[in-house]
Image (spheres, rainbow, N blue to C red):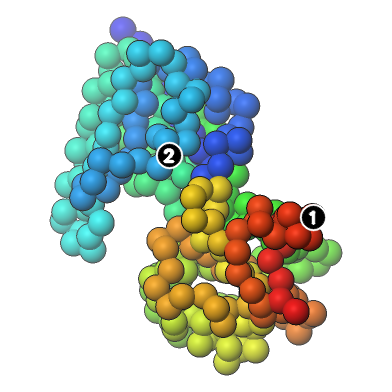
């Protein structure tokens, strides 16, 4: 029996309409859906996004990814998930692993893939890219990500603040993903660099509770897990500090979905 195909599918940032046509077609064909979720609950946002496109009767398998820094616990969970995935493929069934954003950017799929290849070297894999949260944030705010000879640096907000600050100093423009963890430190770092007023902060894009700010003064100290910063051009005009709201609310006022201050 030949091995099934594993599809790594990016479900996008949250809005179901941002799922790609290719992803929707594959989701309507595969027999098994692999949905990553925290071991602390049974909810999968990625599953909620793709559910309208699933084949009738498709089996949904939850793969638990523990939210811990204990490497032994993490290794055991990743190995278990890879083994479960390999078993499905070895039965000849195709499966789709669904993940927020893009499968190869800060994704649980990145933990699964190398372990699956070690367990089942002959496994066939097809990766379907997804729209990222920072692309959605740029669209919601009208903020240009990069142009001409500028560089765009993608950073994680989780980790050493001094390293983050040093890296940010090399960037014309930047994206700080996972900005929830150390947000007060990130905000202070951007203030020292004179870039806080040039920063767009976005949270819960495409789902209930979406908010986008220009400038950081009004952003709560403990934002939601699904939060990011777009840091505007160095020494550029950049966004101004200002009011908050949803992109739809501001779209009604300004016609372009931008939240901006006066």
Q: Which residue lies at the image location 37% right of the left edge and 46% below the top edge?
A: 108
Q: Determine which quarter of the picture holds residue 55.
A: top left
Question: In front: mark 2 or mark 1?
Answer: 1
Work out whether residue 22 or residue 167 is closer to the camera in this orientation and state it: 22
Q: Residues within 10 Å of mark 1 (few under 14, many from 20)?
A: few
Q: Which mark is residue 136?
A: none
Q: Which of the 4 image quarters holds residue 56?
A: top left
Q: Which sits in the foreground, 206 or 181?
A: 206
Q: Name above or below for residue 62 compared with residue 217.
A: above
Q: Residue furthest top?
A: 1
Q: Quadrant of the N terminus?
A: top left
Residue located 28% across and 28% down the image: 61
**Residue 110 shown left or right of residue 144 in the figure:** left
Residue 237 location, x and y as percent?
79, 80
Return the x and y of residue 138 as percentages of the image width and height. Answer: 68, 58
Please give the residue where the numbered disc 2 appears in the rendered image: 46
Looking at the rendering, in which quadrant would you find the C terminus? bottom right
Q: Position of residue 123 (x, y in %)?
A: 37, 25
Q: Is residue 102 above or below residue 8?
A: below
**Residues tagged 2 and 1 counted as in contact (Cβ below 8 A):** no
- Mark 1 lies on residue: 255
- Measured as percent of width and height from the top left, residue 224 is found at 42, 63
């Amino acid at each position: 029996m030949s091995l099934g195909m594993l599809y790594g599918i990016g479900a996008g940032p949250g809005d179901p309409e941002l799922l790609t046509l290719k992803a929707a077609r594959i989701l309507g064909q595969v027999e098994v859906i692999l949905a990553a979720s925290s071991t602390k609950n049974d909810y999968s946002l990625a599953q909620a996004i793709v559910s309208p496109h699933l084949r009738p009767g498709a089996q949904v398998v939850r793969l638990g990814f523990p939210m811990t820094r204990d490497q032994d616990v993490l290794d055991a969970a990743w190995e278990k998930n890879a083994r479960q995935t390999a078993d499905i493929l070895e039965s000849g069934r195709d499966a789709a692993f669904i993940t927020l954003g893009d499968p190869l950017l800060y994704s649980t799929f990145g933990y699964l893939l190398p372990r699956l290849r070690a367990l089942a070297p002959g496994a066939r894999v097809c990766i379907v890219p997804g729209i990222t949260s920072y692309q959605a944030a740029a669209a919601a705010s009208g903020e240009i990500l990069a142009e001409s000879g500028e560089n765009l640096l993608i950073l994680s907000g989780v980790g050493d603040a001094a390293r983050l600050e040093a890296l940010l100093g090399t960037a014309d423009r930047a994206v700080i993903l996972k900005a929830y963890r150390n947000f007060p430190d990130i905000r202070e770092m951007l203030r020292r660099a004179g870039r806080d007023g040039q920063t767009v902060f976005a949270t819960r894009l495409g789902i209930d509770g979406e908010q986008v700010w220009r400038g950081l003064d009004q952003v709560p100290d403990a934002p939601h897990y699904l939060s990011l910063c777009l840091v505007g051009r160095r020494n550029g005009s950049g966004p101004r500090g200002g009011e908050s709201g949803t992109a739809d609310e501001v779209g009604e006022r300004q016609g372009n979905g931008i939240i901006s201050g006066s």
